[in-house]
Amino acid sequence: MITTTDPRSALLDLLARISFRLGNFTLSSGAKSDYYIDCRTTTLHAEGARLTGLAILDVLREHKLHPAAVGGLTMGADPVVSAVAIASAERAQKDPSAPLIHGFLVRKAEKAHGTGRRIEGFCEAGAPVLIGDDVCTTGASTIAAIEAAREAGMKVIAAVCLVEREEAGGRAALEAACQGAPFLRLYTANDVRAAHVRQVAK
């Protein structure tokens, strides 16, 4: 287990070690890249999940954001959402004044059976919510989740991703979709690459 008291530093080290790969890759956008970051390798790792939740809670505290829930587009956001919700519950056990942050998942399309809902989990009109994602490239999945949350009547107060690839147009599209709410990131892809290079050089 990683024992550093700084979840963000420990999470970066883990991402660099188990989620970053150099090579020739085709991204979901169709673009080519000489590296790939599979955040799910980290967010579904036992310690990585713990660190993900704590690191995002720290970002929310820094920016004085108080969402009632966190949600995102399945499936990249799924472990991020669960990690934040669980971390908030654990923090509330230690500090009863700490708020609980519930979770919701956005389907890529409405169900064709049952209730036909597109959003699973928390869904309350007017509630302040955070949209989370693992990697943001074009921002398409984050934007889809933002739009779905708003269509359900929730108020998006911020969006956050673990890693921003800083591709051309991605941030501008996300900021436009956020409509004045902040778009936050824990790291850039260059941060993860640099950490990976340092580890390999040791």
Image (cartoon, rainbow, N blue to C red):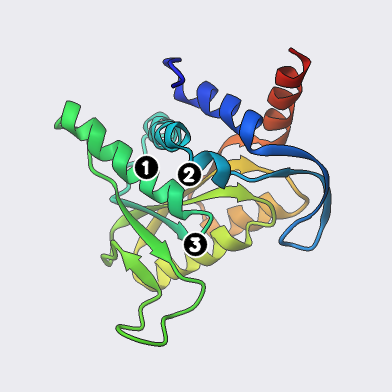
Name which residue type carries label 2: Leu
Residue lying furthest top: 202
Q: Which residue is mark 3?
A: 73
Name which residue type carries label 1: Val
State the SS at label 3: strand
Seen at 33% across and 54% down, the residue is 103
Distance from Cα at disc 2 to Cα at disc 1: 13 Å
In the image, residue 181 lies at what x, y percent?
48, 50
Vertical arrangement, residue 154 with respect to residue 14, above or below: below
Of 48 and 104, nearer the camera is 48
Of 141 and 114, nearer the camera is 114
Q: In the rendered view, does 117 fall on the left or right side of 51?
A: left
| Label 2 Cα neighbours within 10 Å, binned few <14 / some 14-19 / many ≥20 | some
State the SS at label 2: loop
- As drawn, the label of residue 44 is 2
| Label 1 Cα neighbours within 10 Å, binned few <14 / some 14-19 / many ≥20 | many
Q: Which residue is mark 1?
A: 84
Vertical arrangement, residue 8 with respect to residue 202, above or below: below
Residue 71, picture quadrant: bottom left
Seen at 49% across and 78% down, the residue is 109
Residue 91, picture quadrant: top left
- Looking at the image, do the residues carrying marks 3 and 2 touch, with CB atoms under 8 Å apart? no
Q: In the rendered view, does 120 fall on the left or right side of 99?
A: right
Residue 138, picture quadrant: bottom right
